[in-house]
Image (cartoon, rainbow, N blue to C red):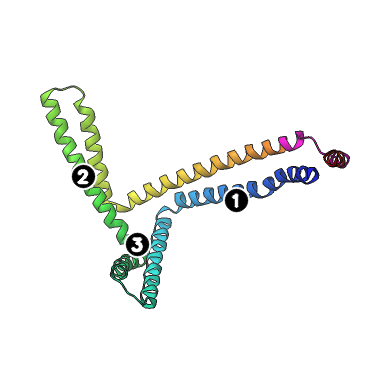
Amino acid sequence: MGRQNTTDKTKEPKKDVQTGSSSGLILNIVLIVLGLTFIIWGKQALDTMTRIIGIFLLALFVAEIVIFIRSKTRETWEKIGLGVSVVLAVFGGWLAISPGSFHNLVNYVFGILILIYGAFGIVNSVGFARASGGLWWVGLILSISAVAMAILILIQPDFLKEIIMIAIGFAIVFSGVTGLYNWVNVRRAQKIIKANSPLVSTSDMKDAGSDEDK
């Protein structure tokens, strides 16, 4: 019993170094490459992701049809599920065929909301200035900036796509670089622990086994 436990303890750290550390390194490298892809090819990456989502929704529709056909009961909830899958299939087909039109629609809605918010902000800032004064101009500047951004989004809808994908790309790259830094530190710590850990000799293992037998 003593010999088996000692052998397992000496092999366990080596297994962690070979498997866990390697997978962590690969994951961090993939994150960095993915983030750089979003930063460099933001619009193309967004279109590709949207098409993948659309194809996934179409695949769910096909799977729902197969399940409905093979079902013998065809209860009410199954018919409702089939109806929902039809709607999702239409939406997924739109995403797969024309992802750009979907993005433009989202950008226009987002731009209109920002425009309305900025217009209300301008009105409130002017009213605040007439009522009490103070730092009313700060809210006015922010509101005018919001209106300017909304107009830019409505005129150039691709502008928002690029900003969003670049922000996501930087976040992913930061996560990958941080994980890679932590991986290097963990790797160094594992090597130090392995170098400083006492090696168990064969004679010591035999002595431990004989002591337990006694």
At horizontal 45% and vertical 51% (from top left) the residue drawn is 38
What secondary structure is marked by label 3? helix
Q: Which residue is label 1 attached to? A: 26
Mark 3 is on which residue type?
Pro
Look at label 2 and name its amino acid. Answer: Leu
Q: Position of residue 161 (x, y in %)?
A: 35, 51
Can you give x and y, in whole percent of width and height, for residue 173 in the image? Answer: 50, 45
Residue at the far right: name it: 203
Of the two numbered discs 3 and 1 in the rendering, the one whose residue sits closer to the viewer: 1
Looking at the picture, how far across and down is residue 75, in whole percent? Answer: 30, 72
Stretch in magenta? 193-205
Q: Which amino acid, mark 1?
A: Ile
Up/down of 194 relative to 105, above or below: above
Taking the image as shown, residue 134 lies to the left or right of residue 16, namely left
Residue drawn at 57 percent across, 49 percent down: 29
Question: Few, some or many C-alpha atoms within 10 Å of disc 2 (few <14, some 14-19, many ≥20)?
Answer: many
Distance of label 1 from label 2 (alpha carbons): 44 Å
Q: Which residue is mark 2?
A: 115
**Other-residue count near label 3 (Cα within 10 Å), few / some / many at <14 / 14–19 / ≥20:** some
| Residue at image point 41% right, 65% down | 56
Is residue 198 on the magenta stretch? yes
Q: In the image, which disc is placed on residue 99? A: 3
What is the quadrant of residue 133 in the picture?
A: top left
Q: Residue furthest front?
A: 214
